[in-house]
Amino acid sequence: MTAMRWFYSFLKKHNKSMALGLVLVTVISVLAIVKPIVSGSIVDDVITAGDYSLLPGLIALLILITILRGVLRYWSQVIFETCSQDVLYSMRDTVYRKLLQEDFNFYNKKRTGDLLSRQTGDMDAIRHFIAFVIYQVYENVFLFFFALVMIFTVSWKLALCMCVVLPFALLVTLSQTKNGRPCFQKIREQFSSLNTFVQENVSGNRVVKAFSKEEYEIGKFNKENDGYRDAELAAAEIWTKYVPQFEFLSNMLTVILMLVGSIMVIQDSMTLGNYVTINGYLWMLMNPLRQIGWRINDIQRFTTSVEKIYATYSEEPAVKHPKKAIPCRKLQGDVEFRNVSYSADDEDIIHNVSFSVKSGQTVGILGSTGSGKSTIMNLLCRFYDVTDGEVLVDGRNVKDLDLYNLRQNIGMAMQDVFLFSDTVEGNIAYSKPDCPFEEVQKAAIMADADSFIREMPDGYDTIVGERGVGLSGGQKQRISLARALLKQPSILILDDTTSAVDMETESYIQQQLNKIDHACTIFIVAYRISSIKDADLILVLNDGKIVEQGTHDTLLQNNGYYATVFRHQYGDYERYIGEISQTTRKGGGRHGTK
Ligand code: ATP
Ligand code: MG
């Protein structure tokens, strides 16, 4: 499908209204054509022939036509404006739905400002096209050719002389279209770039302040601002060059009428009334010619915007909903990674990872920064698809499961906490907006968030701004944890969720997690041994590979990377080894391995 076909698929739903609008415009144009005929009749029949009885009727006709045109103009404009808003509404909705379907890779590579521009500035160019440009172009073309036909009926010789300007008008039109196109592409790109810059600077304002980079950012902004202004000026330079050429051609029509028409009247090959009639039609020829430059401008803005929006819309997500999805409303939570590898942009990120956990077990994942911990969790949620191997949940490949069901069964507190501009309650109850307050509070208590929330000015009704402004890092993490817990998921993922809370809070949260009363497999990604030491299985990752796996005690006995990290964090290793040799004899862990 081409961009224009895609646009037309929205417009065609309003075919009938648009057709009615164009019929009204046709009537308005025809009524405009009657005016010169009446004027010619006043000159020939009333003034020259002296039949004054015709005058009141002709004047009344003129007044009636003027009123009728006004009413029809109002009606047609209401139609075009309504159609444009309706088309825009469904187009925005369709594009937004597609944006929500896009995968992580799409958002990794797209600039937020670009996506915002598609939904705002570009959409407005489309609105302007439907509400104004379509009927303007139609009316002008109609008036031009109708007037030409009428002039032919009055004097074909004069009409032919006037047609001399047509080839020139065509040449200028083609030239403006060709030269203007790159300018409009540039305008849209600069507009997106300016949008991205402002959006990033507003979001990253705290970093700018912390580094006192205001002047530097102003300099960068000025560059973007200059770029956008220059792009608009370059486009303006094009139309300011072409609009006078169209003006010249339209004025040539007056010259032709005066020169050729006067000669014909003097030679008696045309009446003075006919001369007046043709003079009345003249504006119908001149006006469209004058407006060509502007309308090309509008049309190019429109086509560029449609192409940009369609290019974004037509990007298909790599992670797709399976065609024959296995519905899975409630999963058990058994998870298996079978020889899983993942690479992106020709870079291997995960190599041959295999492990298996049963529902109800806890998995701890430890590894240096960039070792692939979050990526493994992202593969489990199908935010990315594996390049090799299989991720199985309840024994079924995640690629075959209903994508939304799978994610509904997973509660994830992401490493990069994002809170919506909403109340604390609204943020926690994001997955279940209608759940009773008690459930929200229970989740908050489990995440050790209840006490600090109640101390906030409006408690659970406190609005936390974009990205949770006004909350500490640990507070944001705990709200995010409560949000994940409220889902009562079969698989709970805590990606670095307790990194910003103190040890006491972390220990409280761990106790609470032990109290989860439904089958739930828990993944805890952490740097702190204390966060994962009680897990049933600990995976130690390095450079995308599992280098060690086992329980806390077996890993300590292996004396590898895990034991080294433990020594760094706990220091007194020898004493601890003594302690664990006793505890291993007793058995343990959240599910009996501690
Ligand atoms: P940290 O502890 O810092 O959170 P991590 O172990 O969670 O690190 P990941 O976020 O999984 O690390 O990233 C592992 C590596 O893969 C990093 O080098 C990252 O840049 C790269 N990476 C992850 N996802 C992608 C992707 N979609 N495209 C390209 N590179 C990626
Ligand atoms: Mg990570």
Image: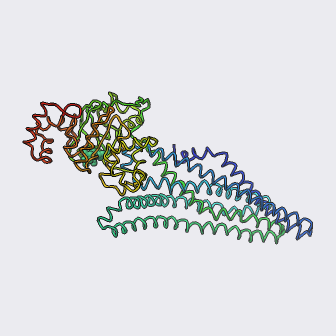
Residue at 67 percent across and 48 percent down: it is: 17
The quarter of the image holding the C terminus is top left
Q: Give the mark count.
A: 0
Taking the spot 48% from the left edge, 61% from the top edge, the residue there is: 183
Instruction: Tell me the quarter of the picture where residue 513 sits.
Output: top left
Left or right side of 56 for 78: left
Q: Is residue 372 left or right of residue 43?
A: left
x, y percent for residue 498: 27, 47
Q: Nearer the viewer, residue 75 or 490?
A: 490
Residue 298 on image: x %, y %: 57, 59
Tell whether 433 sits left or right of 130: left
Q: Nearer the viewer, residue 98 or 53?
A: 98
From what the image shows, is residue 494 above or below residue 338? below
Residue 261, given in percent of the width and then of the height, sits at: 77, 68
- Is residue 253 shown left or right of residue 94? right
Question: Does residue 348 appear in the picture of this structure?
Answer: no
Give the colour scheme shown: rainbow
Q: Is residue 140 visible?
A: yes
Residue 403 location, quadrant: top left
325 or 38, which is in the foreground?
325
- Residue 274 in percent (x, y) is at 81, 65
Along the line of sight, the residue nearer the viewer: 485 or 106: 485
Q: Residue at x 69, y 52 (%)?
A: 22
